């Protein structure tokens, strides 16, 4: 039997990802890492959770293996599975096993979307045992000290059908994210989209107003990521009103009246 | 034997046992005799049907013919006497004195007829008959006269009502004219005059409605004329429905008004403006039409009151911009609490100012 692991070094970041701290999240994350505690990142879409993990991965010098969870993701997909290769049966480590073995950061994005059996795999990794049972191989992998499990969780998406169990939630150190404060968001936009301060300020003002429409028909406000996109389009020469309509308005709602009101808000700035 | 269609109504008078009592070869003749006498009066048919089987049994056609003839003769003078004679005659025919039955019939005929009329009675009868003929001829005219009387009375009542409503209009119009904006005076007066000519009561309703429509800029001069014109059509068909139209109490009236409205209707963009104001102010803002709000409500809660339609510009885009400006102003008022101040806050405000500037 041949065991094949993915090449872990491919997951090491070589360039510092830009991240502007919004509070004490960097210190908190570092403290959790050194205490070998798992971390849960909570916050709306596009507020910088993934970028934060990337930044911390670079900062801590650890490899980062990200898994975008979806409703068909099973424990086998995370841990690994036997595969047929020519005439042999080959064990293929899953991303979680790879991260555990290499002592990197495993980041399960939107973990609540995955199938319930994944939590069975996660639990032993998140308490003081820090082990990963590989049931199919009858093997238990002890996580090294520099391994860290990070999950992200968007409370706004949860429903009675999909939510993390308390027995899962209470295994993590939670770091809560929200949209950055206006001055910080402006700085992020200038940095990420290479736009001037005035344009950044206008985009942030639009975002502030549009975010007021949450609970009035919008599931979520416009994200910092979308503002960056808008800034990038503007920087690329797209007329500001059109750039904003394409990034701030249309992606977040299909409601025609909502779209029109958002366009009017954009028009107050551009 | 069964009764067929040729028997006519005889079956009503002839019971089965009566027919059974008649010799079979005479049954057809029996039925025809009964039918013939029944033509005079059906009660006669019933009695003759009872008595005839007894006479037919005697196989004496002359006796039967004599019976029918005498009964018919008396019945023509008086059918009730005829019935009684039909009942008694068969017994009298059996009397030893063969003339007894004839004498009996003579007496009954005389008794029924009475003495001959004298000349005066004849004249009176003739005069009465003539008068009755004339009365009969007059009947359609009398009926028509009654109809005309009813119509004229109704007309009089309507005239009275019209005058009463004209007086009411005379009293109501001056205060309404005082409220009317001068620029609408001409069209208002023209239209009210038209309606008043058709129905003063409807004009009373219209005077009030049209004032609000014109003053509230809900309809243009041409729109007002069209609205009145269609209302007059309704009024012509049915006064009550027409009055409801001018009161804006009918669906059709409101539909016509909606159709005639120019500019941008608030209803069509209310949600867009609500979302716009909510986004600007960060508060849950409601958009209300001036039609739906009373003055006390306007400054007390988080809502923005706007006109039901905007006709400041010719283009919809510009009218929308006008709405937007008004909404933004309202959103600012809500966001910064322009109308949140209350007299109860004065002591607290004074204290705050004292601390800030004199301490």
Image (spheres, rainbow, N blue to C red):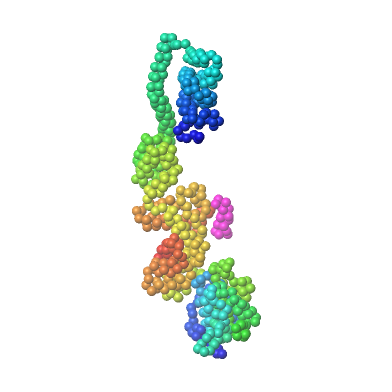
Q: Residue furthest top?
A: B119
Q: Which of A190 and B260 is in front in this view?
A: B260
Please give the name of the residue rendered at 52% of the width and 52% of the height, measured from the top-left corner: B300
Q: Residue furthest right?
A: A128
Q: What stretch is highlighted in magenta?
A: B342-359
Q: Which of A37 and B151 is in front in this view?
A: B151
Q: Residue A2 is drawn in which quadrant? A: bottom right
Q: Residue A80 is drawn in which quadrant? A: bottom right
Q: Residue furthest front?
A: B59
Q: Residue A104 is drawn in which quadrant? A: bottom right
Q: Residue B218: percent from the left, percent from the top?
A: 40, 47
Magenta run includes residue B345: yes
Quadrant of the frame with the N terminus of chain A: bottom right
Q: Residue B287: percent from the left, percent from the top?
A: 47, 54
Q: Residue A97: percent from the left, percent from the top?
A: 57, 83
Quadrant of the frame with the C terminus of chain A: bottom left
Please give the name of the residue rendered at 36% of the width and 37% of the height, measured from the top-left corner: B194
> Height in image: B255 above or below B238?
below
> Height in image: A109 above or below A6?
above
Majority secondary structure in the magenta region? helix
> Height in image: A40 above or below B325?
below
> Height in image: A109 above or below B24?
below
Q: Can residue A84 be seen in this view?
A: yes
Magenta run includes residue B20: no
Q: Is residue B202 visible?
A: no
Please give the name of the residue rendered at 43% of the width and 9% of the height, measured from the top-left corner: B118
Report whether A112 appears left or right of A202.
right
């Amino acid at each position: 039997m041949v065991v094949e692991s993915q090449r872990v070094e491919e997951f090491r970041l070589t360039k510092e990802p830009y991240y502007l701290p919004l509070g004490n999240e960097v210190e908190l994350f570092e403290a959790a890492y050194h205490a070998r505690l798992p971390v849960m990142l909570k916050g709306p879409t596009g507020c910088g959770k993934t970028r934060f993990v990337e930044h911390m991965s670079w900062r801590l010098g650890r490899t980062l293996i990200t898994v975008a969870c979806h409703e068909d993701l099973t424990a086998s997909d995370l841990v690994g599975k036997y595969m047929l290769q020519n005439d042999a049966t080959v064990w293929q480590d899953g991303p979680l096993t790879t991260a555990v073995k290499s002592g990197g950061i495993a980041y399960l994005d939107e973990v609540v979307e995955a199938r319930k059996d994944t939590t069975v795999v996660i639990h032993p990794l998140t308490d003081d045992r820090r082990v990963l049972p590989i049931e199919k191989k009858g093997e238990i992998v002890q996580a090294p000290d520099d391994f860290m499990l990070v999950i992200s969780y968007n409370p706004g998406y949860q429903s009675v059908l999909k939510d993390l169990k308390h027995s899962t939630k209470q295994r993590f150190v939670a770091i809560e994210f929200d949209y950055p404060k206006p001055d910080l968001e402006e700085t992020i936009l200038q940095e990420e989209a290479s736009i001037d301060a005035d344009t950044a300020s206008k985009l942030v003002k639009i975002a502030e107003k549009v975010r007021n429409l949450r609970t009035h028909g919008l599931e979520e406000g416009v994200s910092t990521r979308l503002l960056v996109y808008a800034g990038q389009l503007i920087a690329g020469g797209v007329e500001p009103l059109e750039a904003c309509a394409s990034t701030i308005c249309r992606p977040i709602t299909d409601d025609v009246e909502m779209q029109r009101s958002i366009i009017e808000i954009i028009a107050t700035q551009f | 034997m069964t009764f067929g269609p040729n028997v006519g109504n005889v079956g009503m008078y002839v019971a089965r046992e009566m027919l059974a009592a008649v010799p079979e070869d005479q049954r057809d003749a029996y039925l025809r005799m009964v039918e013939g006498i029944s033509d005079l009066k059906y009660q006669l048919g019933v009695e003759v049907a009872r008595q005839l089987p007894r006479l037919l049994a005697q196989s004496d056609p002359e006796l039967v013919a004599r019976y029918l003839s005498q009964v018919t003769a008396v019945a023509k003078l008086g059918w009730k006497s005829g019935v009684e004679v039909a009942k008694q005659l068969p017994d009298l025919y059996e009397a030893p004195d063969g003339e007894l039955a004839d004498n009996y019939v003579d007496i009954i005929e005389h008794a029924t007829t009475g003495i001959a009329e004298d000349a005066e009675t004849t004249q009176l009868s003739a005069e009465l008959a003539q008068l009755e003929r004339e009365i009969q001829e007059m009947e359609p005219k009398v009926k028509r006269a009654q109809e005309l009387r009813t119509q004229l009375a109704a007309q009089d009542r309507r005239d009275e009502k019209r005058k009463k409503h004209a007086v009411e209009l005379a009293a109501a119009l001056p205060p309404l004219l005082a409220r009317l904006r001068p620029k609408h005076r001409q069209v208002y007066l023209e239209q009210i005059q038209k309606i008043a000519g058709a129905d003063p009561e409807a004009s009373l309703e219209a005077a009030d409605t049209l004032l609000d429509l014109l003053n509230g800029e809900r309809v243009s001069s041409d729109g007002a004329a069209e609205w009145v014109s269609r209302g007059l059509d309704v009024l012509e068909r049915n006064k009550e429905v027409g009055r409801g139209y001018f009161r804006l109490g009918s669906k059709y009236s409101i539909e016509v008004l909606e159709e005639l409205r120019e500019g941008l209707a608030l209803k069509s963009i209310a949600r867009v403006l609500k979302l716009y104001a909510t986004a600007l102010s960060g508060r849950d803002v409601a958009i209300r039409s001036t039609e739906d709000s009373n003055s006390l409500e306007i400054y007390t809660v988080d809502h923005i009151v706007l006109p039901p339609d905007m006709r400041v510009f010719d283009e919809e885009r510009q009218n929308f911009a006008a709405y937007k400006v008004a909404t933004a102003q309202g959103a600012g008022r809500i966001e910064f609490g322009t109308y949140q101040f209350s007299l109860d806050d004065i002591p607290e405000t004074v204290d705050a100012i004292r601390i800030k500037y004199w301490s």
